């Protein structure tokens, strides 16, 4: 597919989605990690509902076998809790070949689990050439992009998912680092089983984007909306100081435009859960979820 043909196809998909969903908004599912330590899927699913969550991460089981995976799918479905994502979270660009293969094999296994448990997606970052940091000058090069394309294809082609999709989470210090580089990645991977994981806070990487987050969020969804499978929720602040620093905080404690986030999320072609992350305890997650629901209510967005 040529670049022009891909751009026209993407534009048509976005235009079609906009026309369809301008008439009716989709209700949004909110989820978060839970702090209950238990290996019984039914207990875990009920705990999500007790906390008013209708989406979840795949539980952190050590070695889930086929029976546990099937039991998890059944228990969560019975409670109307969608499994938003199965995290891989390994460095699939590790510079040591043996470790890279081990990590890729793990990501393939997680992709298979995601498909078996009927999760929206399996998610990982693209990784890093640097063993000690996610940041490295090589992480924004053509070499990095091409290696990421190869890794995504390997994972998808080996796992052969039928329901779930493999996704890469956008990050501030490596590719994909925004909507345009993600569109390039979608084109290059060239697999219908490849999707988008949306975390707007990860790419609000300049004062202009930070202070005008609603405008940038509109652009992210305008370009990537048809492929979004799952999303993360948090907020950002810039503290005082002589260097530019972004700090993650609970939604409502920063200035990220959640009305824009929710309005856009409610209008994409498929149901993509919104998962809160990186907070200390249930109270902080509940604070963030309540803020999000309030923001949604103010722009006519409903929640499952």
Image (spheres, rainbow, N blue to C red):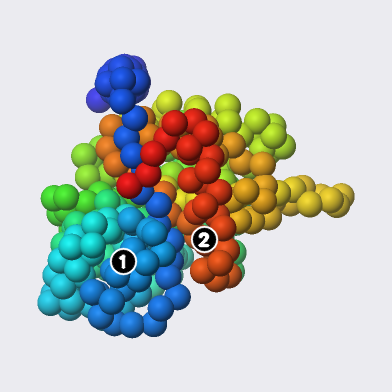
Left or right of 111 in this view: 60: right
Q: In percent of the image, x 27 and y 58: which residue is there? A: 81
**In the rendered image, which quarter is residue 68 located in?**
bottom left
Up/down of 60 relative to 172, above or below: below
Instruction: Find residue 161 and name its label.
Output: none
Which quadrant would the N terminus be assigned to in this image?
top left
Q: Is residue 213 visible?
A: yes
Q: Position of residue 205 (x, y in %)?
A: 64, 42
Number of marks present in the image shown: 2
Q: Position of residue 208 (x, y in %)?
A: 69, 32
Callout 1: SS: loop
Q: Is residue 207 above or below residue 156?
A: above
- Tell which residue pokes out farthest to the right in this image: 242
Question: Which of the two residues, 2 or 122, is positioned nearer the viewer here?
Answer: 122
Residue at the (46%, 51%) spot, across then down: 232
The Cα–Cα distance between marks 1 and 2, rounded to whole angstroms, is: 19 Å
Report which residue position mark 1 lands on.
58
Task: In this rendered view, identify the residue nearer to me: 55 or 199.
Answer: 55
Residue at image position (15%, 66%) is: 74
Find residue 191 and report its image quarter: top left
Is the residue marked by circle 1 packed among few (<14), some (14-19), or many (20+) residues within 10 Å?
many
Which callout, 1 or 2, points at the residue further toward the start of the chain? 1
Q: Are marks 1 and 2 in contact (CB under 8 Å)?
A: no
Residue bearing the label numbered 2 = 286
- Seen from the viewer's position, the closer of residues 194 and 237 is 237
Question: Residue at position x 72%, y 37% from top?
Answer: 207
In this view, the mark in front (1 or 2): 2
Q: Residues within 10 Å of mark 2 (few under 14, many from 20)?
A: some
Residue 139 appears anywhere in the view: no
In this rendering, the answer to whether 103 lies above or below 177 is below
Q: Position of residue 181 (x, y in %)?
A: 46, 35
Give the structural element (helix, strand or loop) at label 2: helix
């Amino acid at each position: 597919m040529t670049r022009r043909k891909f751009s026209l196809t993407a534009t048509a998909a976005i235009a079609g989605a906009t026309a369809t969903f301008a008439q009716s908004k989709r209700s949004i599912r909110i989820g978060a990690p839970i702090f209950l330590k238990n290996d019984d899927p039914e207990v875990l699913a009920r705990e999500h509902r007790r906390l008013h969550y209708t989406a979840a991460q795949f539980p952190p089981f050590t070695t889930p076998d086929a029976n546990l995976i099937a039991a998890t799918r059944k228990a969560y479905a019975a409670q109307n809790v969608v499994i938003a994502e199965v995290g891989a979270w390994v460095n699939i660009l590790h510079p040591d070949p043996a470790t890279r293969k081990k990590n890729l094999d793990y990501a393939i296994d997680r992709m298979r689990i995601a498909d078996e448990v009927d999760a929206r997606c399996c998610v990982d970052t693209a990784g890093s050439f640097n063993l000690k940091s996610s940041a490295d000058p090589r992480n924004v090069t053509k070499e990095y992009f091409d290696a990421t394309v190869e890794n995504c294809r390997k994972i998808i082609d080996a796992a052969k998912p039928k329901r779930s999709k493999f996704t890469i989470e956008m990050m501030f210090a490596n590719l994909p680092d925004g909507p345009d580089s993600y569109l390039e990645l979608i084109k290059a991977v060239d697999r219908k089983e490849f999707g988008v994981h949306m975390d707007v806070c990860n790419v609000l990487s300049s004062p202009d984007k930070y202070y005008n987050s609603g405008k940038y969020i509109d652009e992210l969804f305008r370009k990537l909306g048809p492929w979004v499978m799952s999303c993360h929720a948090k907020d950002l602040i810039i503290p005082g100081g002589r260097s530019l620093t972004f700090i993650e905080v609970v939604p409502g404690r920063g200035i990220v435009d959640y009305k824009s986030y929710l309005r856009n999320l409610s209008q994409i072609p498929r149901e993509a859960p919104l998962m809160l992350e990186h907070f200390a305890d249930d109270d902080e997650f509940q604070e963030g979820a309540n803020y999000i629901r309030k923001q949604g209510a103010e722009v006519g967005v409903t929640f499952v």
